[in-house]
Image: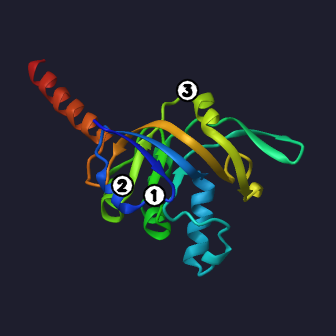
Amino acid sequence: MAEYYLQTPISENDVRKLRAGDIVYISGIIITARDSAHKRALDLAKSGRKNEIPVNFEGLAVYHCGPVVKKINDEWKVVVAGPTTSARMEKVEPEFIKEFGARAVIGKGGMGPRTTQAMKEFGAFYGAFTGGAAVLAANAIKKVREVHWLDLGVAEALWVLEVENFGPLVVAIDSHGNNLYQNVMTKAEEKYREILKTI
């Protein structure tokens, strides 16, 4: 297990060095995006209106998060920023990675085989952030650079965040096809079958 400090934009070469189980800290820009933002971005791209997407995800980290924010004078401040369960995005994440070139996806609970394959093919990784550590995440956020698509709601908007040493993130899916969550499920199923034989 190794520890890496990455700066956005993250290169494919940097991603390919990572292995499942490594620890990563990210500095630079991460962008929050949940179900509605993923859908809108993909719909715009499919309809030939990619230029209407207000951010460029290439080389950046997409954070599955609906932050709690407050506005002080004219500036937004993130109060807490815990991860959202990533499985909700499994249906759209592979296409999102392919279409927009995001190098990292951050969330909790892992993702499935389709996202794992997309990360292997296009050079991305999944960084698991500990659920319940929302204040730790907020402390790493130095500034809200921009916010877009507030019409979707605060939690579903695109929050463009400047972060410093955001983490620790466990590389749960690497760009070589390794998925720690799937490994656990496979071992659990094997153990389950063994137990059934003894009953």
In-image side of 32 versus 178 (left or right): right
Residue 195 screen position, x and y as percent: 15, 22
Q: Upstream in the sequence, badge 2 or badge 3? A: 2
Q: Upstream in the sequence, badge 1 or badge 2? A: 1
The picture quadrant where one finds residue 191 is top left
Q: Are the residues tagged 1 and 2 within 8 Å (C-beta)?
A: yes
Q: Given the image, on which type of amino acid does mark 1 rest?
A: Ile
The residue labelled by disc 3 is 132
**Residue 75 vs residue 111, the one in the foreground:** 75
The residue labelled by disc 2 is 15
Disc 3 crowd, CA 10 A, few/some/many (<14, 14-19, 20+):
few
Disc 1 crowd, CA 10 A, few/some/many (<14, 14-19, 20+):
many
Disc 2 crowd, CA 10 A, few/some/many (<14, 14-19, 20+):
some
Q: Given the image, on which type of amino acid does mark 3 rest?
A: Gly
For the residues labelled 1 and 2, the Cα–Cα distance comes to 7 Å
How many numbered circles does the render carry? 3
Residue 47 screen position, x and y as percent: 59, 79
Q: In the structure shown, which secondary structural element does the residue marked by tag 3 occupy?
A: loop
Q: How is the image coloured?
A: rainbow
Q: Are the residues tagged 3 and 1 within 8 Å (C-beta)?
A: no
Q: Residue at x 60, y 53 (%)?
A: 31
Q: Residue furthest bottom?
A: 48
Residue 28 screen position, x and y as percent: 57, 51
Does residue 114 appear in the picture of this structure?
Answer: no
Q: Residue furthest top?
A: 199
Q: In the structure shown, which secondary structural element does the residue marked by tag 2 occupy?
A: helix
| Residue 92, above or below 44 | above
**Residue 198 vs residue 5, the one in the foreground:** 5
